[in-house]
Amino acid sequence: MSTRPPFECIALLLQGGGALGSYQAGVYQALAEAKLHPDWVAGISIGAINSALIAGNPPKKRVDALRAFWESITSAPLIPPALWSPLLGSGGWSGDLSRGWINQMWAFGTLLGGAPGFFRPRAISPWLAPSGTEGAQSFYDTKPLRATLERLVDFDRINAGGMRCSVGAVNVTTGNFVYFDTATHVIDPRHVMASGALPPGFPAIEIDGEFYWDGGLVSNTPLQWVLESQPRQDTLAFQVDLWSARGEYPQDLISQDVRLKDIRFSSRTRHGTDQFRKAQGLRRALARLLERVPDSLKTDDDPELRKLVAAADDKVYNIAHLIYRAKRYEGACKDYEFSRATMEEHWAAGYDDAVLTLRHPEVLQRPATPDGVATFDLSELREPKRR
C-alpha cells in the first residue's frame, strides 16, 4: 500500500483468548505487509501481550518479536508426541477424531507442565500453601512471562509515545475495570501481566498497592475504550476477536462447554458496534443541527449548549471484524492447547483472513453512510460483508 488510508487513527483491537492469540499475530503480519501500521494498539489478556510485543518493537522487528514469543511458548509438552502419537495411529483414526485426541493430549501436557516462557506449575499445590501467600492463590507461577516480556519488549519504546498502547485489567477488591494506557500511565511488565492474570490459574498482579486480575472477567474486548476515548478521531479499527458469538446449537455436554466459552468471552462485540453506530449517528446529527444555530445564540455562558457542543462531532469510523472460527476438533481446551502445529494453524488463519479483508478497497475508504460508521465482517464464504 503506497498511501495511508484517510483516517486520523489506525487502531488494532485485540481480544483475550489464550492459545488462540497467534491468530492475532497472523492478522498483524498481514497488516504490516500492507504497511498498515497501527497508531493505537489495545488488548485484553493474550491480546495485551500481543499489544506489548507490537508497541514495544520497531516496525521491522514486530513480526519477529511475535514469532519469537509464540514459538517459545509452544515447544514440546510434558508428554512427548513420540509416546502417544503411535497409539492414535494404531487405532486407524483419522480426520477430526484423531486431531481432537492429539489436541487433548497437548492440552493435558500444558495443564501438567505449563508453557515455556509463559507459566509453570507451582512446586506446592495451592491447597497446601499458607493462606494469604501467592502460592495459595493460583495453580501456576507467571514469573517466566515477566522474563519473556523483558526480553522481547522495549518498554521505554512503549512509553515514548510513538504508538498508543492500552491494556485492560480488573481491580480485585473494587471490581472496577481499569485501562492502563500510555496516555495516562507508564506501562511496565506488571500491567501486561495483570491484564492476563486469570484466576485460579494465574495469580493477581500487584501494582501500586492494588491487585489486578484478567480484564476478560468484565470485558474481553477493548472496542468501547478506543471508540469512546476523547478527543474522537476519524478511525480505521481492526477488531480481532478470538471467540465467535455466533455458533451452532450444542448437541452434548462437551460442545455445550465450548459454546459457553464462546458466548462468555466474545463480549458481544457486534452489539457494542451496533450501539456505537447509533450513538455516533446521533452525534453527527447533533453536529449538523448545531450548524444551524445562529452565532448570536452560541455563547459560552450557556452550560446546556456547552454540553451539546461537547457531545457533537462528525468523525467517521470503519470497523473491520476479524473473528477466529475454531475447528470442530479444537474443543473446550482450545484456549490452553499450546502446540506448535495448532499455533501455526491459528497464525495462518489470521493472516489469510486479514489478506482477504484487505482485498476489498472499501474497507480502507472513508464511509459515506449518514451515521459515519461502516462495519465489515468475513462471512462463512470468507468474503467481507458490509453492514
Image (tube, rainbow, N blue to C red):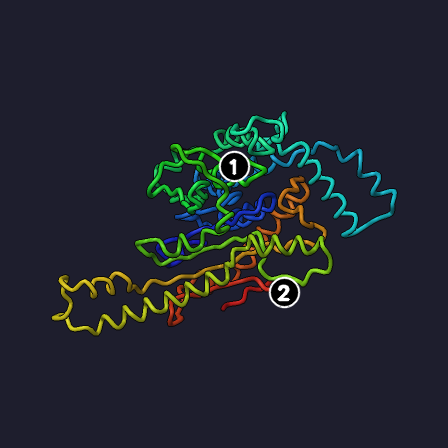
Kindly identify the amino acid type of the residue bearing the numbered disc 2: Leu
Of the numbered discs 1 and 2, the one sitting upstream in the chain is: 1
**Rendered image quadrant of residue 142:** top right
* Residue farthest toward the left in the current orientation of the protein: 296
162 or 79, which lies in front?
A: 79
> Residue at the spot x=53%, y=47% of the render?
16
Question: Mark 1 — residue?
Answer: 65
> Residue at the spot x=23%, y=70% of the render?
290
Task: Label 1: state its secondary structure.
Answer: helix
Q: Residue 154 carries which label?
A: none
Instruction: Confirm whether residue 279 shows in the render.
Output: yes
Horizontal and vertical percent position of residue 253: 71, 54
297 or 29, which lies in front?
A: 297
Task: Answer above or below: position of 105 versus 296.
Answer: above
Horizontal and vertical percent position of residue 365: 42, 63
Question: Badge 2: few (under 14), some or many (20 or more) residues near its Cα, within 10 Å?
Answer: few
Left or right of 252 in this view: 324: left
**Rendered image quadrant of residue 371:** bottom left
Task: Label 2: state its secondary structure.
Answer: loop
> Residue at the spot x=67%, y=63% of the render?
249
Question: Mark 2 — residue?
Answer: 381
Kindly identify the amino acid type of the residue bearing the numbered disc 1: Ala
Task: Answer above or below: position of 278 versus 20.
Answer: below
